[in-house]
Image: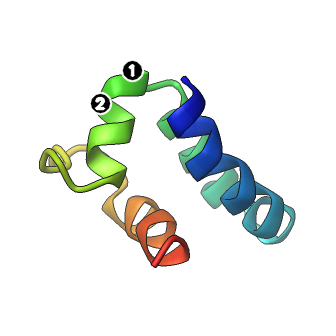
Amino acid sequence: MRELDLLLGPFAEMHVPHMTEPELKAYDELLNEQELDLLSWITNQEPVPDDKNHELIQMIRKFHK
C-alpha cells in the first residue's frame, strides 16, 4: 500500500539503524499486521488495540508531525 510505504519508509530509514533488538522485533511484528489496520492506527483513524506496541506507533506518529 503506497500510503503506508510513504509513512514507514522515511521512518525506517531514520530509526531502524539505531533500534535495539527488542525494538526491531516489535517493528517487525508491527509490519506483519494488516496494512489497512496499521495505516488506520498510525493515522489515528482507529484506536490501537491494547495488545499492540503503542510506544512504537507513537514514535511513528511523532515522526510525521
Q: Amino acid at mark 2?
A: Asp
Residue 54 x/y as whole percent: 32, 61
Residue 37 x/y as whole percent: 29, 30
48 vs 5: above or below:
below
Q: Residue at the spot x=28%, y=47% of the render?
A: 41
Secondary structure beneath dot 2 equals helix
Separation of disc 2 and disc 1 at Cα?
5 Å
Q: Would you call the spot at circle 2 few (<14 residues within 10 Å), some (14-19), or many (20 or more)?
A: some
> Residue 13 got which mark?
none
The residue identified by callout 2 is: 37
**Picture quarter with the N terminus:** top right
Q: Residue at the spot x=53%, y=37% of the render?
A: 4
> Quarter-wise, where is residue 62 in the image?
bottom left
Q: Amino acid at mark 1?
A: Gln
* Left or right, residue 16 beside residue 41: right
Residue 26 x/y as whole percent: 54, 48
The residue identified by callout 1 is: 34
38 vs 10: above or below:
above
Quick one: 16 or 65, which is closer to the camera?
Answer: 65
* Left or right, residue 62 beside residue 36: right
- Whether the residues at callouts 2 and 1 have beta carbons within 8 Å, the answer is yes
Secondary structure beneath dot 1 equals loop
53 vs 1: above or below:
below
Q: Residue at the spot x=38%, y=69% of the render?
A: 58
**Picture quarter with the C terminus:** bottom left
Q: Would you call the spot at circle 1 few (<14 residues within 10 Å), some (14-19), or many (20 or more)?
A: few
Quick one: 34 or 55, which is closer to the camera?
Answer: 34
Quick one: 47 or 64, which is closer to the camera?
Answer: 64
